[in-house]
Amino acid sequence: MDILTFQLIGDPAKAPHMAKYMKDQFPFLGLPTPMRKSQSKALLKVSREQNLATVRRWITDLYQREAREYQYVAIDLALENVKRWQFADIQFLQQFVGQKSWWDTVDAWRKVFALYVRIHPDQKPAVFALFFDEPDFWLRRVGINLQLLEKETQDTAMLSRAILADQDTGEFFIQKAIGWSLRQYSKYDPTWVQQFLNAHKLSPLAVREASRYLSAHD
């Protein structure tokens, strides 16, 4: 399969609504997720048989295309091959978080890096370092939410470091990320989260998000 001939076919009638949902920042083909996955299934399957340099080239090609759905397919390719990636590949993929950035792709990329960390737990600090203290707040959002679904493997010192570095940042998507990570971890260790909230002055948004499940443990 040649990536140059790969094309998605959408429904133009759906495109305006999908674009509006993303604040009209990106053009859409009008391709809902199930249809996108169906149309890209063969590409993803073939990708597992390609060398990683080829898969990286495919991701780069798709990310340069105008329609938003192609960025989604690029991320699907990264997820499809996550068990094969090495740290050098993760370093390569980091760049795409800062391209055509919005919450949809940034949070999808987070899943790629989080899954890689789950497979290579010894590399978590190195992966975290790719996102911590970056000028681009979208990259920092990935760092804050890198351990989002972790429970007993959560590195609370790392989580604290990520949150406190952006404690006073006014960016909505950063404060939302802080609250999201704390809320998710509170399902596993509500005592730690409550103690963290007591010890640090966070934004009202972050506190509200973080506290959502805490009352159930009082």
Image (spheres, helix red, strand yellow):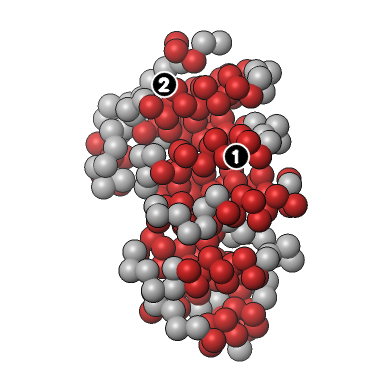
Residue 23 or residue 58, whichever sits in front:
58
> Mark 1 or mark 2, which has the lower sequence index?
2
Instruction: Check the picture and name the quadrant holding the C terminus.
Output: bottom right
- The amino acid sitting under disc 1 is Ile
Q: Can residue 39 be spotted in the picture?
A: yes
Q: Position of residue 75 (x, y in %)?
A: 51, 35
Number of the label disc, if any, that sits on residue 25: none
Instruction: Check the picture and name the quadrant holding the N terminus.
Output: top right
Looking at the image, residue 196 sits to the left or right of residue 173; the answer is right
Label 2 Cα neighbours within 10 Å, binned few <14 / some 14-19 / many ≥20: some
The residue labelled by disc 2 is 8
- The amino acid sitting under disc 2 is Leu
**Measuring 43% from the left and 33% from the top, which residue is drawn there?**
71
- Look at the numbered disc 1 and give the secondary structure of its residue: helix
Q: Position of residue 44 (x, y in %)?
A: 59, 24
The residue labelled by disc 1 is 90
Q: Can residue 40 be spotted in the picture?
A: no
Label 1 Cα neighbours within 10 Å, binned few <14 / some 14-19 / many ≥20: some
Q: Is residue 27 above or below residue 187?
A: above
Q: Position of residue 103 (x, y in %)?
A: 40, 50
Q: Is residue 208 above or below residue 180?
A: below
Q: Is residue 36 above or below residue 103?
A: above
**Measuring 55% from the left and 76% from the top, which residue is drawn there?**
213
**Measuring 36% from the left and 39% from the top, which residue is drawn there?**
100
Q: Is residue 42 above or below residue 19?
A: above
Q: Residue 129 occupies which quadrant of the picture?
A: bottom right
Looking at the image, residue 171 sits to the left or right of residue 191; the answer is left
